[in-house]
Image (cartoon, rainbow, N blue to C red):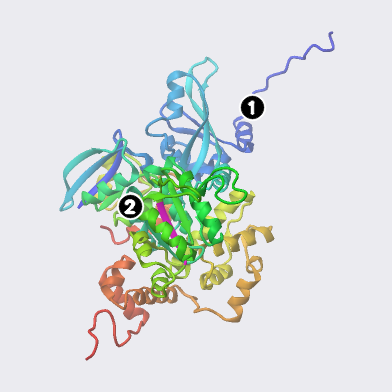
Amino acid sequence: MRVAIPYWGNRISPVLDTAENFLFVDIQNGKCVKKDEISFSGKSHFEKVDYLKKHSVNWLLCGAISDYYYNLFSAKRIKIIPWLRGDIDHVLEAFLCNNLFEPGFVMPGCKGFGRRRRRLRGGF
Amino acid sequence: MTENRKKPIKKTKLSHDEITAILDSVAEGVFTVDENWRITSFNRAAQKITGVPEEEAVGSFCFDVFKASICETDCALRQTMKTGKPIINKAVYIINAVGKKIPISISTALLKDKNDKIIGGVETFRDLSMVEQLRKELKDRYTFEDIVSKSPNMKHIFNLLPLIANSDSTVVIMGESGTGKELLARAIHNLSYRHTQPFVIVNCGALPDTLLESELFGYKAGAFTDAKKDKPGRFTIARNGTIFLDEIGDISPALQVKLLRVLQDKTYEPLGSVQSYKSRARIIAATNKDLPQLVKEGKFRQDLYYRINVVKIEIPPLRQRREDIPLLLEHFIYKFNKLKGKEVVGVSPDVMKILMNHNYPGNVRELENIIEHAFAVSSENLIKPQHLPEEITKVSTRAPQPGYNTLSQLQKQYILNALERNNWNRYQTAKELGIHKTTLYRKIRKLGIDFPEYDGRSKPKE
């Protein structure tokens, strides 16, 4: 399973739409086995989405995401967990333990991932 | 002289509550941050624009609350803190708590204590949604982002659109009236490298044949009586842009031949001209008619049909993607709230039922008109059945459409429609619906959907 996380410093990017750097994490048996940093500087949104799809990303963990971007990624069947905040290592750890619903990981004002929460049911 | 002398104003120290009350009465969003980018105050307008309550905002990092396009790369407050210079009216956008992009203009300044020591920054921002909406209405600046849909059929179009936009192929968009053919054509144009060039619309059904020819190709002075000077045609005006030929199914056979030549040789001749001109515009055609049927009936040239039918996009009518109705409702209510300065929060459950059951012969445009009508006749903040046009409520009460009183009924109808579209092939249907085949089987059994004797899987009986 491959997870993509847009990052900024050591934190998750606040806005996916404008994020330029992504961390690709390969997960096997509940453990991170490989991490790659990808820069999307100057790339269009379609190039970003296509790149993630071509590189078999299954999950996208991100901060704020516009409806437009949400549709683009979900049209490519990439599962999205939006409205996340915090240190990327902590977010990744919480994802592996299925603890992302803890209030500390959810952006202010975005209670329980809002209308998108149901997409998370059943875990991964 | 002494009377004009100003009396010294006695400075009174305001309490925290008084400062909060003042900030809350301001129409602009205001927040302050400390040196660690943690929010220290967040006024009422800021809460309204961002959708984040004060108790959750205060103490959080400003970028996790504000979620602006510039947070990561070009933070205005960071610049002000670094240079000491304020930034005034910088246009950016934020993403609010429900995923909507809100255009805003921001201004920043330093916060200093009484000893002139910097203790943080202050940012004020104005919601520009209304200005942006008006700009879009006036300049028809609608883009790919303005297409509202979550339907699987439309998602397929979303996937194709960037690829189509990047190619130079002729596109034909088919769909009933009001489905958004022009919006889609505009989106293709805006996504393509031609977006800086003109987007020219020609409604082929609105003009008589001779007028349409001169409109498309232009004419030379003296071509006919009163043609006193040259008139450029739409192909000339479009230059390297896009020409959108709406209602292409309505053009006469004679003009079809001329259009065929433009498509084949990329050349055209204005009326009265002996010289051919090169056309570099991309052609996007649209029709609400069944072109293959018109070809069969001999009303539309087969060679022209194949020339324009390089890339075909079919927009499904609204009745085939009812799941988009709540989403579109939300979109139109937001739009008209901004345009008309109202604060309508939504529709009543009765209205939702009526709108979900309506057949929409006029498609998305009809739904938009229904909401605009409700905005015009109502002063309440909830749209109720009495605010809907009479013909909608009449149809609904006189001849009820297949009712969707429950979610399972709606699901059943939706799956049935999808099965019919896919000739009862379960695998294809599951693929279209974006669910696993087994989930579809389970739903079919649970919802009691009966299969016809012949379906997409079984072989026809000998």
Residue B52, percent across and down? 49, 44
Magenta segment, prevailing SS (helix, strand or loop): strand
Disc 1 is attached to a residue of which chain?
B
**Along the horizontal axis of the image, is A35 left or right of B451?**
left
Question: Was residue B286 drawn as part of the magenta stretch in this picture?
Answer: yes
The numbered mark 2 sits on a residue in which chain?
A
The quarter of the picture where residue A62 lies is: top left
Whether residue B64 appears in magenta in the rendering, the answer is: no
The quadrant the N terminus of chain B occupies is: top right
| Location of residue B443 in the rendering, given as x and y in whole percent from the top left corner | 33, 75
- Most distant residue in the bottom direction: B462
In the image, are marks 1 and 2 on the same chain? Answer: no
Relative to the observer, which residue lies in front, B363 or B326?
A: B363
The local crowd at label 1, few if under 14, some if 14 to 19, many if 20 or more residues have their Cα within 10 Å, is: few
The disc placed on residue B14 is 1
Q: Position of residue A102 (x, y in %)?
A: 35, 49
How many dots with numbers?
A: 2
Q: Is residue B10 left or right of residue B458?
A: right
**Residue drawn at (24%, 86%), measured in percent from left and top?**
B460
Which image quadrant is residue B95 in? top left
Kind of residue at disc 2: Phe
Can see residue A85? yes
Per the rendered image, the range of residues in magenta is B283-288
Residue A101 in sight from this viewpoint: no
* Amino acid type shown at disc 1: Leu
Tell me the residue that label 2 is attached to: A73
Q: Residues within 10 Å of mark 2 (few under 14, many from 20)?
A: many
Front residue of B205/B92: it is B205
